[in-house]
Amino acid sequence: EIVLTQSPGILFLSPGERATLSCRASQSLSGSHLAWYQQKPGQAPRLLIYGPSGRATGIPDRFSGSGSGTDFTLTISRLEPADFAVYYCQQYDNSPGLTFGTGTKVEIK
Amino acid sequence: QLQLQESGPGLVKASETLSLICSVSGGSISSSYYYWGWIRQPPGRGLEWIGTISYSGKPFYNPSLKGRVTISADESGTQFSLNLSSVSAADTSMYFCARHGGFGVRNPFDVWGQGTLVTVSS
């Protein structure tokens, strides 16, 4: 099973600041098959980024993804109030063992 | 517009079988090449993939749950289901159904249901 470790666990930032979230895989993702999701309380996750730098439909360009191999990053260039949420990475490289990361909570400072 | 909706009992007794249905509207499971999955999330915790079924009915399961999980699709192409046997308190979770955004399991989940909370009681 591929284990995904996200850091930091909690990120305290202010609106307008830049957020940098990390996701590290326990083994290399050969096809860079990594996605990022945003989840707000009481809601289902929403796909933000896939592949690992493609933006899903309707996702604003302040969200960007990068990385390859075992190290991946989600960047939110300028935080807006709606961006304070929990973010999960997910690898879909290893079938049938799909796994999610531990999550990073972005909180208002 | 594609929509997914989970349904089923909110309370299941320990050692029994949890059964949920995902109803698909605005599309068909069998007439497209998408794959369809189940994911769960214990209260206050992270996400766990349970399994996936292909448009042709082939299932794929999380190895950690294999043996207890069965995912199937009905012939109408508008529903797929999850059965999880021998449940315990550890299976108490929000259960989501979702669509893989492409052909195959190796695609992210691009459309999600709202989720349904299942509590296992002793």
Image (cartoon, coloured by chain):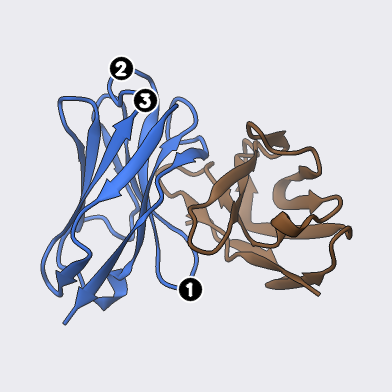
Chain colours: A brown, B blue
> In the displayed structure, does residue A99 sit left or right of residue B72?
right
Residue B77: quadrant of the picture: top left
Precedes in sequence: disc 3 or disc 2: 3
The percent position of residue B52, horizontal first and vertical second, equals 34, 41
What chain is tagged by disc 1? B
Q: CA distance from mark 3 to mark 2?
A: 12 Å
> Callout 2, which amino acid?
Ser
Instruction: Say what secondary structure mark 2 lies in.
Output: loop
Precedes in sequence: disc 3 or disc 1: 3
The percent position of residue B60, horizontal first and vertical second, equals 31, 41
Q: Nearer the viewer, residue A61 or B89?
A: A61
Give the total number of marks visible in the rendering. Answer: 3
> Callout 1, which amino acid?
Gly
Residue visible at 73% across and 37% down in the picture: A53
- Residue B7: which numbered mark, if any? none
Relative to B46, does residue B8 appear above or below in the rendering?
Answer: above
> In the displayed structure, does residue B34 sit left or right of residue A88?
left
Residue occupied by mark 3: B26
- Residue B44: which numbered mark, if any? 1
What chain is tagged by disc 2? B
Q: Nearer the viewer, residue A29 or B55?
A: B55
Packing grade of label 2 (10 A; few <14, some 14-19, many >=20) is few
The percent position of residue B18, horizontal first and vertical second, equals 18, 60
Relative to A18, does residue A94 appear above or below in the rendering?
Answer: above
> Callout 3, which amino acid?
Gly
What chain is tagged by disc 3? B
